[in-house]
């Protein structure tokens, strides 16, 4: 079995103003770092509108379409911009997440990494925010549940920022366990332990500023892994943000490239134990270009190891 790398050149057409951390160069650095790896390379389709409408109301789609610029930039909130290529990129990003689910559940590949932008985990039901337009990971989870008929999916989010959007979109979904670690305090401010979902199916693990790999490993080993094991997911979806890296300019956790590889290997082992190794990983944040590229490469290398 192999690991799929799903991406599309349209994801490089979502442009942001000079100096914006969520920049085209992020994905360029990642794709360059992944070039030597043995991966099944797949072109991301545009997402089907039905997949978007499973998690976002049609008004959200309409609002984005009407805001979409034909030139220059449109500012959606304090740090979220649209350029003429944004909607195509967002449709490819969501489409990559869905295609990853189809390939893994269809047995075409063991696991898959969607190298995409814009990211997704801050997009709430009706609100684009925090560089995000559609909830890629939540959309993939709903696709697995509704289209493929799975009964239980786990979504694990290790981006340094709280996945407020995924939490909002999965808040009342008993078939999805949402496990998320984040620096606290930090933007967007949510992610307290007592935010646990309608069915108690959300696990928030706030981590203090300046904490590092030891605190992360303790939280995942002590809390996350037992919860995932007890939930018995049929698929694990990862919101893979690499901005908890010690070199990242937007946050102050001190994870190393090895910490991301350790966490990935542990999640692969859990998937092997619980769900025939089925993992779909989608890119979220990570803003130091070199740290992002190296940590992503380490993450994908662990996926490849688990697939062979
Ligand atoms: Zn982030």
Image: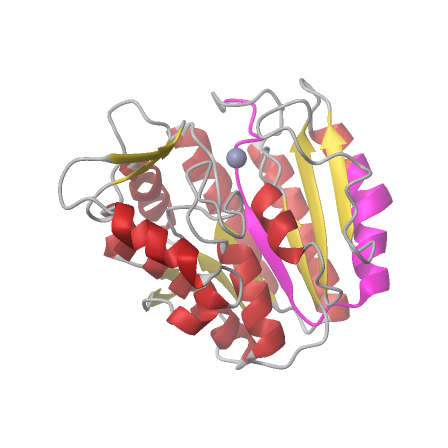
Report which quarter residue 67 is drawn in: top left
Q: Is residue 64 visible?
A: yes
Q: As drawn, is 223 to the left or to the right of 27?
A: right
Task: Please give the name of the residue rendered at 58% of the width and 39% of the height, measured from the top-left corner.
Answer: 159
x and y, in percent, of residue 255 in the image? 62, 29
Instruction: Examine the rendered structure and indicate whether residue 162 appears above or below residue 62.
Output: above
Report which quarter residue 174 is drawn in: bottom right
Task: Please give the name of the residue rendered at 69% of the width and 44% of the height, measured from the top-left corner.
Answer: 180
Q: Is residue 232 magenta?
A: yes
x and y, in percent, of residue 213 in the image? 70, 30
Q: Nearer the viewer, residue 178 or 76?
A: 76
x and y, in percent, of residue 181 in the image? 69, 38
Q: Nearer the viewer, residue 59 or 292?
A: 59
x and y, in percent, of residue 160 in the image? 59, 33
Colouring rule applied to residues:
secondary structure
Q: Nearer the viewer, residue 72 or 103?
A: 72
Which quadrant of the figure contains the C terminus?
bottom right
Q: Is residue 36 magenta?
A: no
Q: Residue furthest left?
A: 71
Q: Residue furthest front?
A: 59
Task: Please give the name of the residue rendered at 46% of the width and 31% of the height, measured from the top-left corner.
Answer: 291
Q: Is residue 3 visible?
A: no
Q: Nearer the viewer, residue 185 or 298?
A: 185
Stretch of the chain drawn in magenta: 218-247
Q: As drawn, is 91 to the left or to the right of 260?
A: left
Q: How many marks?
A: 0
């Amino acid at each position: 079995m192999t690991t799929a790398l799903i991406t599309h050149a349209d994801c490089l057409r979502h442009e942001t103003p000079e100096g914006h951390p969520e920049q085209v160069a992020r994905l360029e650095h990642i794709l360059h770092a992944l070039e030597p790896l043995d991966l099944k390379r797949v072109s991301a389709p545009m997402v089907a509108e039905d997949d978007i409408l499973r998690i976002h109301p049609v008004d959200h789609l309409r609002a984005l379409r009407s805001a979409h610029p034909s030139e220059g930039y449109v500012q959606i909130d304090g740090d979220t911009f649209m350029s003429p290529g944004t909607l195509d990129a967002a449709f490819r990003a969501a489409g990559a997440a869905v295609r990853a689910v189809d390939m893994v559940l269809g047995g075409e590949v063991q696991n898959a990494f969607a190298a995409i932008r814009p990211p997704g985990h801050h997009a709430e039901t009706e609100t684009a925010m925090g560089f995000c337009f559609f909830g890629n990971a939540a959309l993939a989870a709903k696709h697995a549940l509704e289209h493929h008929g799975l009964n239980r999916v786990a979504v694990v989010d290790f981006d340094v920022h709280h996945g407020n959007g995924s939490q909002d979109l999965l808040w009342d979904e008993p078939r999805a366990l949402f496990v998320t670690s984040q620096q606290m305090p930090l933007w967007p401010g949510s992610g307290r332990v007592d935010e646990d979902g309608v069915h108690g199916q959300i696990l928030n693990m706030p981590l203090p500023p300046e904490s590092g790999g030891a605190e992360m490993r303790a939280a995942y080993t002590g809390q996350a892994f037992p919860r995932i094991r007890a939930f018995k997911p049929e698929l694990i979806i990862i919101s893979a943000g690499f901005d908890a890296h010690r070199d990242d300019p937007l946050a102050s956790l001190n994870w190393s490239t090895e910490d991301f590889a350790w966490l990935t290997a542990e999640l692969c082992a859990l998937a092997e134990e619980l769900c025939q190794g089925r993992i779909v990983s989608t890119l979220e944040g990570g803003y130091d270009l070199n740290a992002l590229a190296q940590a992503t490469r380490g993450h994908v290398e662990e996926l490849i190891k688990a697939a062979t």
